[in-house]
C-alpha cells in the first residue's frame, strides 16, 4: 500500500462532503482524509494503485477543487 499526500483547497466540512462520494467511488483507494487545520489542507490517501494520482486530481478538479501532489 502506498500513501500519497496532496496540497488542496478543501477548506471545510462542506467541501469534504462535496468530494466524499467521488473519492469513495475511486477504484484502488483504500482510505483518505483531509487535514483542514493544516495550512496546505493536506489530503492523505492510501492506495494500492499509483495510477490513482491522476484520478484523484481529476475527480477533485471536476468538483471545483485543486490537488497538487506533495
Image: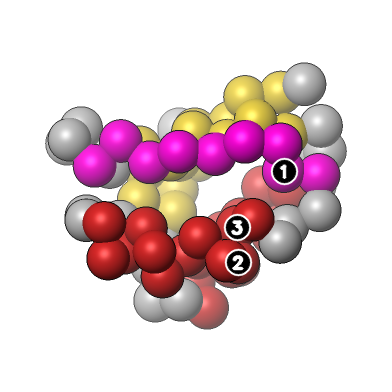
| First to last magenta residue range | 28-36
Q: Is residue 28 left or right of residue 65?
A: right
Which is nearer the N-term, disc 3 or disc 1? 3
Q: Is residue 10 left or right of residue 38?
A: right
Which secondary structure, mark 3? helix
Q: Is residue 58 left or right of residue 70?
A: right
Residue 29, disc: 1
Q: Is-magenta flag for residue 33?
A: yes
Disc 3 to disc 1, C-alpha distance = 8 Å
Residue 60, disc: none
Which is nearer the N-term, disc 2 or disc 1? 2
Who's the residue at 20% across and 32% down the image?
Answer: 38
Query: Looking at the image, which is closer to me, 38 or 24?
Result: 24
Q: Are the residues at dot 2 and dot 3 in contact (C-beta closer than 8 Å)?
A: yes
Which secondary structure, mark 2? helix
Instruction: Locate residue 17, reporting x and y percent.
Output: 39, 64
Residue highlighted by disc 2: 22
Amino acid at each position: 500500500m502506498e500513501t500519497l499526500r496532496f496540497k488542496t483547497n478543501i477548506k471545510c466540512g462542506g467541501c469534504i462532503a462535496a468530494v466524499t462520494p467521488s473519492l469513495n467511488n475511486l477504484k484502488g483507494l483504500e482510505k483518505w482524509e483531509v487535514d483542514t487545520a493544516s495550512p496546505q489542507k493536506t489530503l492523505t490517501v492510501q492506495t494500492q494503485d499509483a495510477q490513482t494520482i491522476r484520478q484523484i486530481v481529476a475527480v477533485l478538479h471536476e468538483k471545483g477543487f485543486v490537488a497538487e501532489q506533495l
